[in-house]
Amino acid sequence: MILRGLMVLVIHLAMIAPVFAESDSPGVSWDQLTQDEQRTLKPFQDRWDEMPSQRQMRLQQGAKHWTKLTPRERGRMRERFDRWQQLPQEKRERIRKRFKRFRSLPLEKRHALKEKRRWFKKLPPERRNALQRQWKNMRSLDRQRLRRPPNLGRPHRKHSIPPRRLAPGRDRPRLHRPGR
């Protein structure tokens, strides 16, 4: 009985130990940052010691990435950040939620969406614009239907038309003729 209680205590301590280790782990001190990182993270210097260690590490990784960018890439990043700052708060929140939802998708679906986006970006501008106009003019129900994956392998609804099935090697559907 005592052994069982001790075992439960050890298991609980083992489960919560990482939580305490993460929260108590010291972050990176400002002096440990390289000069380039310090220059990049200068706006955070006054608050650096009060930040959680995880945030410090993310900022440090971002600073390392920033120093590796070419001046042209940095300029594009600044432009994108400025555009982000100019967006209304509600729109930024919608984008964050959409991104969070995207990140929660299975890897295969994320790759498929990225491929569709690449395909769309490669279209000629007039075709892209036509598709965008078509999308905007659609009813929301039609948009939802397009967003859903095809209903493969599931029974069809009572009023839906079943898909045509092709026999192997045939390019036309086989017609059912009574008496054959």
Image (cartoon, rainbow, N blue to C red):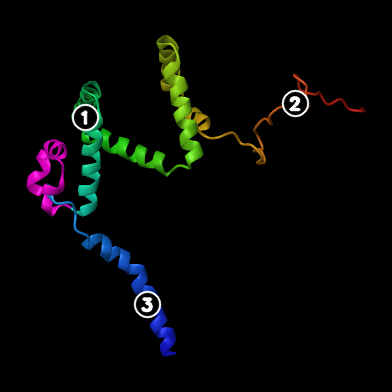
Q: Which residue is mark 3?
A: 10
Q: Nearer the viewer, residue 129 or 51?
A: 51
Among the 4 quarters of the image, the one containing residue 20: bottom left
As displayed, is residue 139 above or below residue 28? above
Report whether 66 appears left or right of 142: left
Residues at marks 3 and 2, CA–CA distance in whole angstroms: 62 Å
Q: Which mark is residue 166?
A: 2
Q: Nearer the viewer, residue 57 or 157?
A: 57
Report whether 158 appears left or right of 27: right
Q: Quick one: label 3, few (<14), some, or many (20+) residues within 10 Å?
A: few
Q: Which residue is mark 1?
A: 81
Q: Quick one: label 1, few (<14), some, or many (20+) residues within 10 Å?
A: few
Among the 4 quarters of the image, the one containing residue 24: bottom left
Q: Nearer the viewer, mark 1 or mark 3?
A: 3
The amino acid marked with disc number 2 is Leu
Quarter of the image with the N terminus is bottom left
Which residue appears at 25% of the width and 24% of the height?
73
Residue 112 placement (x, y as % from top left) = 50, 32
